[in-house]
Amino acid sequence: MDEVQGQYEELAELAGSLAHEIKNPLSIIHMNIELLSEDLVEIDTAASRRCLPRVDMVRDQCERMEALLRDFLRYARLRHIDLVSGSLNDQVRQVLGAYQAQADAQKVDLQQYLDPDLPSIRLHSDSLQSALMNLVKNALEAMPDGGQLWARTYSNRSGVSLDLIDTGGGVDDNTVMHMFEPFYSTKDGGSGLGLPTARKIIEAHGGRISVQSEVNRGTKFSLQFPVPPRLG
């Protein structure tokens, strides 16, 4: 098992290095495509106008690849994070606050039911907020014409839990089975790394994430985190 784990870590490190090496020449290509587009606009001939849509297509694909590489590097580099005692409720409030304006614009009602007596957990604020933001972003994308998103925290025998429940379009059972697999995406232009990275972050907190969804009814993500034992 240790040998297999070592091979996996070596492969992940090589993949991360390869992605980093691709990122630099891709940035140069993107920059030069931008310059070429500006030159073609200035020339303003029939030939240059025919070329512009092709240049735009190359630029769009460069931007898509750059976004994919950013997501992949974030996923590949996440191995160990330093955890400190903190409030899950505070993390939820900050994330929902960051999306309040977007929710208002989409007529999505954000509801918080946060247990005021929730025990502290061990967390890494930046990475945990990144995971929660991905889940909230997905929920809002599922409700372009309005709806409701509930965030509920509570204690149970397993520790501390967070439910995020939306009234969006939901997904079918096949999508639920594969949604945490790297590069699996039902969105046009999606990297398929958002949910796998969120799961990796939550597991790095010693927690776990599960999902239930029903088409035309909505989706529920459930997160569970352990509570550190009391000292003394």
Image (cartoon, rainbow, N blue to C red):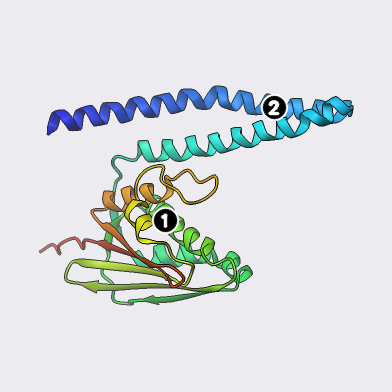
Image point (24%, 73%), residue name? 155
- x and y percentages locating residue 22 in the rendered image: 49, 24
> Which residue is at 32% across, 55% downward?
177
Distance Cα–Cα, label 1 vs label 2: 35 Å
Mark yes or no: residue 223 visible. yes
**Residue beneath disc 1:** 129
Q: How far across and down, in percent of the image, does residue 191 sit?
A: 47, 43
Point 36% across, 48% down: residue: 196
Q: Which residue is mark 2?
A: 33
Mark 2 secondary-structure assignment: helix
Q: Secondary structure at mark 1?
A: helix
- The image quadrant that residue 165 belongs to is bottom left
165 horizontally vs 224: left or right: right
* Image location of residue 179, percent across then percent down: 37, 52
In the rendered image, is residue 220 in sight?
no
Position of the C terminus by quadrant: bottom left
Q: Residue at x 30, y 39 (%)?
A: 79
Q: Nearer the viewer, residue 206 or 142?
A: 142
